[in-house]
Image: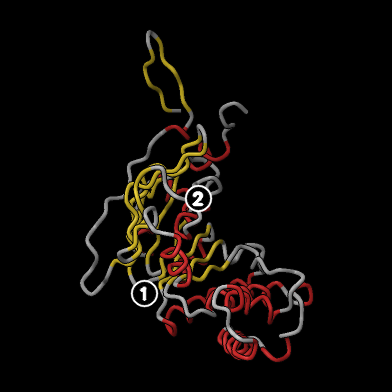
Amino acid sequence: MAEVMAGNGTQSYGVRDKLEAAAPLTPPPPGKEVLIKIRELHKRFGSRHILRGINMDVYKGETLVILGGSGSGKTTLIRHLMGMLRSDEGAVTVGDLNLNKATPAEMETYRKRMGVVFQGAALLNSLTVLENVGLPLVEVDHKPAAEVRTRVIESLRKVYLPAEEILDLKPASLSGGMRKRVGIARAIIQEPEIILYDEPTTGLDPVTVNGVNELTLELQKTLGVTSLVITHDLHAANMIADRIAMLYLGRIIAVGTKEEIAANQHPVLQQLLTGSTHGPLTEAYLQPKKGA
């Protein structure tokens, strides 16, 4: 427990109130270009301070994995990157576009540059594979049916699915791994510059997990996309990441290559890497919340 002096006594606060030191920003390595810049990002919901001064750079063409436990702020961060939330303080800048100041027209253009792989694939059960994957082309780009079908087939083949065999099937007829690949096919159909993966391997068996990880790697190389992967899966992080960032209680407390993260002696990282049930992660995420 952290303690502060209050009046004539000592008042105790839980680990959730402790503000960890943020990882310092460093200049990009030679040949690397910063595509996404996050500076002093804060977000509150009522009395809950979820993002508490996030600073982070994402390099063009890299796969950056953001690790964090439940309640660390991963979902809130990804919603800012998608343009679904606007920060209370600070900014997310993609290229020259400040998302907090972007007009609706600029946001529409920005979202076309981005594909999202949602947790659980987020397919619409009442639609076929063709309709699910082609949805952005129909609803956003207003493409004719023949072009939509052709591009859906191309997108499904990129994720190694038998396109013609599954076009008319609905999600309930597909395995978990196939549904995930259909979700990825939808994410890449507009040929995005950036792909966000929200817990892409949650709920999948180990073989399917490896398949999704390998596909993530291949798409990053063949399409040249910049990938941000939100996860708590260490195996996935080690398999696909160029760099790893650790999100803890609303702050990025460490960022680096896999080797740098493995060598980092921060107690939060060490608990995550060893899987110990004792340490700051346990105190932060398992302690009773205020008012509970």
Give coordinates of residue 255: x percent, y percent: 35, 57
Give coordinates of residue 139: x percent, y percent: 60, 73
Q: Nearer the viewer, mark 1 or mark 2?
A: 2
Q: Nearer the viewer, residue 161 or 35?
A: 35
Q: Nearer the viewer, residue 137 or 154?
A: 137
Q: Quadrant of residue 208?
A: bottom right
Q: Is residue 49 left or right of residue 200?
A: left
- In the displayed structure, 23 sits above or below 238; it is above
Name the element at disc 1: loop
Q: Quadrant of residue 88?
A: top left
The residue lying at 46 percent from left, 21 percent from top is 12
Q: Is residue 27 left or right of residue 148?
A: left
The residue lying at 58 percent from left, 74 percent from top is 136
Give coordinates of residue 18: x percent, y percent: 41, 33
Q: How is the image coloured?
A: secondary structure
Residue 160 visible from this viewpoint: no
Tag shown at residue 76: 2
Residue 59 visible from this viewpoint: yes
Amino acid type at image mark 2 = Thr
Determine crowd level at label 1: few under 14, some 14-19, many 20+ residues with C-alpha closer than 10 A. many
Q: Quadrant of residue 227?
A: bottom left
The residue lying at 48 percent from left, 64 percent from top is 229
- In the displayed structure, 215 sits above or below 88; it is below
Q: Nearer the viewer, residue 13 or 49?
A: 49
Give coordinates of residue 89: x percent, y percent: 36, 43
Image quarter of the C terminus = top right
Name the residue tied to disc 1.
Answer: 61
